[in-house]
Image: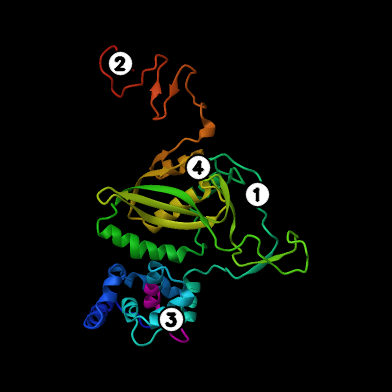
Amino acid sequence: MLGNWLPHKEYQSNVIESLSCIAQTSPEPIREYKDAISKLYLLDLDCLKPIIAPLYSHTGRKAEYQPEIFRSLVLMSSVHYRLDNWVEKLQNNPVLRAICGFGDKMPQTASYYDFIDRIYPLDESPCLRSIDRKPTKKYAKGEKIPPKHPEIVGKLVAKIIDGRRFDSRPELTLQKIFARAVVDKSQGMGLIPTIVDVSGDGTCIETGASHYGVKTCECKDFKCSCPRKFSDPNATWGWDSHNACYFYGYTGYFISCYNKNRKLDLPLYLRFVEARRHDSVPAVVALTEFRDLHPNMIINSFISDSASDNYPTYELLDHWDINAVIALNSRATGCFSFPAALFIDDNGNPVCPAGNKMRNWGSGQKHLLW
């Protein structure tokens, strides 16, 4: 069951008191971690409790230091440490312990793994399976692998409009935490407007695990087809259209918005899918999940690359009254419903046979239309 949860205001008071005592004798470590101190001092985790409370039973031994462990994981990522060495680092560094909110007692490594398994219940234990061979077919630079099932986007959109959702995904708890603890707080600070233009795009994320796996048979041939042990069983082969090469890992599909005042791209939603998944599939799923996570945020426009240039996506955006700003697929170049003598330039302006661009609200007889 979930144990004691220290409110954020009490955490801030404890951090100030602890760091003040340390600063009297060793001020340099505090200056070294000033950015991390500011980050965790502002990270309010009070909204985290109702999200993760259902993940614990109502009986049994209490799970202590849950908000502190979450802060510790955020800090570990900020200072680029691995979990295996992180607990030892905290034990020898009073500044880092104070930032996380730990006192004299600290949870061990097993407590971290238990917390991770609760908020992200994805089975990543090594498994035995046949080797996933690297594809041999090459694609041009900038060209994406076509979807394995061409009609899948249309089927998904039909289910989404019908009210179907994807609530069984393992990253749902993480997405709720990010939405409530980060995005909502940023919106409250004025960094994210209520009416927002969002961008969606996928990115290639390579895994550190080997795609060859570990042999468990006695075959002398290294390329045998016997089952092998894979430390990252969920990784697959995908095509990196930017670098025109295959990669082994995952595809991350992210939704973000642009802050004009600070000139920053702010992440709003993050999701991991199979590397071989075409971006048109996670695009409609991510946009649906993002709207469900932020019902008070109005999406004005959805900006995407040519992967989302398909009729089902336009149908979904029209259903939600969202403007579509999507690059046209190069494979459909020239397939317009205009007369042959009329063509469209790169900016989407119709051009007459004389080479003049159509003018918006042109005046005078000469420029009545062009």
Tell me which amino acid carries mark 2: Leu
Please report whichever mark, 4 or 2, sits nearer to the chain's N-terminal start.
4
- Label 4 – label 3 distance at C-alpha: 46 Å
Of badges 2 and 3, nearer the viewer stands: 3
- 299 left or right of 133? left
**Residue at label 3?**
88
Start-end of magenta stretch:
58-72
Of badges 1 and 4, nearer the viewer stands: 1
Magenta segment includes 34: no
**Residue at label 4?**
307
Compared to residue 118, the image places residue 316 above or below, namely: above
Residue found at the very far top of the displayed protein: 365
Tell me which amino acid carries mark 4: Ala
**Residue at label 1?**
135
Label 2: element kind: loop
**Residue at label 2?**
368
Of badges 1 and 3, nearer the viewer stands: 3
Label 3: element kind: helix
Q: Residues within 10 Å of mark 3 (few under 14, many from 20)?
A: few
Tell me which amino acid carries mark 3: Glu
Residue 37, can we see it?
Answer: no
Label 1: element kind: loop
Of badges 4 and 2, nearer the viewer stands: 4
Image location of residue 75, percent across then percent down:
37, 71
Compared to residue 370, the image places residue 52 above or below, namely: below
